[in-house]
Amino acid sequence: MSRLEHPDNARSASQHALLGRTYGSGFEPNLEDWLLHRPRRVILGEGARWAIWYPLRRYGAFATLPHDEQGGILREHGRIGHAFGEAGLVQDIRLACFGLDRDDNDFVIGLIGRELHPLSACVQAMRSTRQTAQYMQHMGPFFLGRTLWQSPLRP
């Protein structure tokens, strides 16, 4: 039996699979591009040398907050991501995974960049936001990857 065929390896692989779908928040200037093309550009772009992928799940109490309060919490969190993005340090891919994985996570997040340190620093900076500090039930496990080869980005 090969290493990949071993039953323990198959069980381990299925426990570490991440599955999600692209989604829009209503603020995208071009929804089709956001949903279908941007994720490929980010993953296959020049800046995609390192990646940190992780699932997360919020406490249910977040969903019961008034929409304007949810929006304020998300904007606080988003400002940090935008600052890293505008500095050219981090790009993200956010996938919704409601009902798609065995742990009932809400999202799968991919942070992609040229260097590893800014990706970790972005996660660290977001720990102090209200969303993460008060409403995050679970984050991780974290999967770290380094690009060894990329398919060419085709239009």
Image: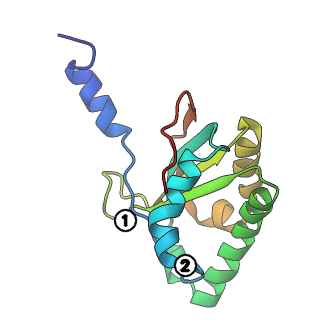
- The residue tagged 2 is 30
Give residue 9's position: percent from left, percent from top.
Answer: 28, 23
Above or below, 111 relative to 85: above
The quadrant in which residue 38 appears is bottom right
What coloring was used for the rendering? rainbow
Residue 26 on image: x %, y %: 54, 83
Name the residue located 46 percent from the left edge and 74 percent from the top edge: 32
Front residue of 155 and 132: 155
Mark 1 or mark 2: name the one nearer the start of the chain.
2
Identity of the residue furthest to the top in this view = 1
Residue at far front of view: 155
Q: Are marks 1 and 2 in contact (CB under 8 Å)?
A: no
Examine the rendered structure and indicate whether residue 55 appears above or below residue 8.
below
Residue 138 is left or right of residue 88, and the answer is left
Q: Is residue 69 above or below residue 11?
A: below
Q: Is residue 147 above or below residue 65?
A: above
Q: Nearer the viewer, residue 41 or 97?
A: 41
Q: Residue at horizontal 27%, vertical 14%? A: 3
Residue 68, quarter of the rendered image: bottom right
- Between the C-alphas of marks 1 and 2, the distance is 24 Å
Tell me the residue that label 1 is attached to.
Answer: 98
Which residue is at 20% across, 22% downward? Answer: 7
The amino acid type of the residue labelled 2 equals Asn
Q: The residue under label 1 is which amino acid type?
A: Phe
Residue 46: numbered disc: none
Mark 2 element type: loop
